[in-house]
Image: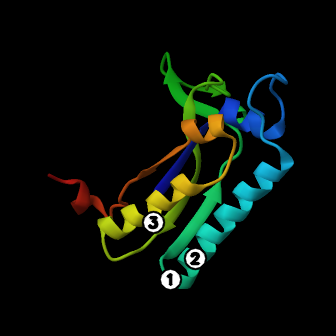
Amino acid sequence: MLMLYASQRAYDEMAGNVPEDEAVWSAEELAEMYEFMEKFNQDLVESGEFVDAQGLAAPVHTRRFHMKDGAPAVTDGPYPETAEVLAGYTVIECDSFDRASQIAARLAQCPGPEGARERAYADLRPIVDGRADLEP
């Protein structure tokens, strides 16, 4: 699984909701990024390695569920604007972890404003098939 990260700040920048003197995505830069990701996924479909890909809503729409004083509690939008959270994912199925690493490395070529590109990253992490894969 390729896990793509962003922050509330990144979502705000893409929506143009930051001060004028700070890095902001232009409509053209956003279109280039979306086009890159569509081609990235299409290439995986054509190679037979694509399983699924989804983007996630901005962190501000998150609700965190946990226990507090023995009762369920809910926190809305628990992430500060600089906290990085999962922004989307791509599930691939390929021959090896090395091949998956090659696929993940292509994400570094995704276009965007320089400031945004420097903060962007993705993690590659295997999905386990079952409980046996988690046991030592």
For residue 43, the mark is 2
Residue sitting at the far top: 69
69 or 95: nearer the viewer: 95
Q: Which residue is mark 1?
A: 47
Q: Determine whether label 2 and label 1 are within 8 Å by CB.
A: yes
Assess disc 3: are there few (<14), some (14-19) or many (≥20) residues with their C-alpha within 10 Å of its C-alpha. Answer: some
- Name the residue: 71% across, 32% down: 60
**Pointer 3 or 1: first along the chain:** 1
Residue beneath the point at 80% across and 26% down: 18
Give the Cα distance between marks 3 and 1. 11 Å
Tell me: residue 31, above or below residue 66: below
Other residues around mark 2 within 10 Å, as few (<14) / some (14–19) / many (≥20): some
Type of the residue with mark 3: Ile
Q: How many C-alpha atoms fall within 10 Å of the one at disc 1: few (<14), some, or many (≥20)?
A: few
Instruction: Give residue 41's quadrant in the image.
Output: bottom right
Up-down relation of residue 64 to residue 106 (above or below): above
Residue 75, position in %: x, y?
64, 25
Residues at badges 3 and 1 in contact (C-beta under 8 Å)? no
Marks 3 and 2, how far apart at CA: 10 Å
Is residue 1 visible from the viewing direction of this image? no
Residue under the point 47% across and 77% down: 49
Is 70 situated left or right of 34 in this image?
left
Relative to 114, does residue 90 appear above or below in the rendering?
below
